[in-house]
Amino acid sequence: MSQNLTLLEHIEQAIASLEVALPARNQTAVQLQELLTCGEYDIQQVLDLVASDQALTAEILRVANSSFYGGLSEITTVQNAVVRIGGPEVVRLAIAATEKKSYQVNDPGLAAHIVPLWQHAMGVALGARWLARKLGFQALENEAFIAGLLHDVGKLLLIKVCDDLMTSERIGRDIPEPVIQEVLETGHCRHGAALLEHWGLPDAYRVIVLGHHDDLVNDQNTLLLLVRLADLACRSLGVGMNSDASLNLAATEEAHALDIRDVMLAELSIMLEDSFSLV
């Protein structure tokens, strides 16, 4: 690696010069998200999309049979999953399963970040959706799930570009862990927002990705508050690459803005701990 450029500058230069291709959005995820957003769809449309991908089917069945959903009998078909956990939940799981496919890299050192990064994305998605339902924002459930799933997509982008540069030997593989962590923390919001713009996703999600670490809390954006609080809850439980067991969720601006009580925050933590079987 050139001594004149930092790792982040190498990554940004590669993106700007098109030396590396930006990750493409999974088209099955796009179609499923469109169905979920419109709210009115024939469940057969979902079944047909899922049936076209054996790996996707297997992942949905794995998750639907996890302890999180507590079924007494084994689910063997996606149709059975719809009956047990509902069509919207199956669509959300299908979206998550398609996004999970993107969480792959070649370099063993970078690969160590992939599992916790995915666990955090899924945890925030589940937490934000759960909060939306519990706090009476049912109309935001699907958006909260997708926003939570994508909020740290900038970290995935930076890791994948770094992996491409390592594979092509444009940078070395002996990058200190603190440097990688600094790059991810420094650049993931703006690069994640740019990626969502590249994908043509609604501005509502770009705002979440760009602002989920802002010092000033926008208490007028309920969706952002839900994702930020779910993010903090996951951090307090050590779900992801960063953890802070000292976090007092009840004392956060997000909890105050959402007018959420200690009991519900405790229930949120329990739900998140139970959800570990999903990832």
Image (cartoon, rainbow, N blue to C red):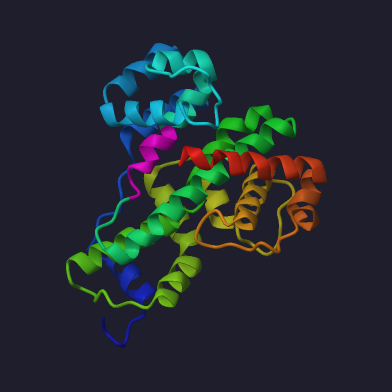
Name the residue at the front extreme: 72
In the image: residue 99, left or right of residue 227 = left
Q: Magenta residues?
A: 95-103
Q: Tell me: residue 38, above or below residue 147.
A: above
Q: Tell me: residue 4, above or below residue 10.
A: below
| Most common SS among magenta residues | helix
User: Does the magenta-highlighted stretch encompass residue 102?
Assistant: yes
Quarter of the image that includes the N terminus: bottom left
Q: What residue do we see at 60% from left, 44% from top?
A: 273
User: Does the magenta-highlighted stretch encompass residue 271?
Assistant: no
Nearer to me, 22 or 104: 104
Q: Position of residue 165 (x, y in %)?
A: 24, 67
Q: Quadrant of residue 21?
A: bottom left
In the image: residue 136, left or right of residue 56 = right
Q: Tell me: residue 264, above or below residue 10.
A: above
Nearer to me, 146 or 59: 59
Q: Quadrant of residue 51?
A: top left
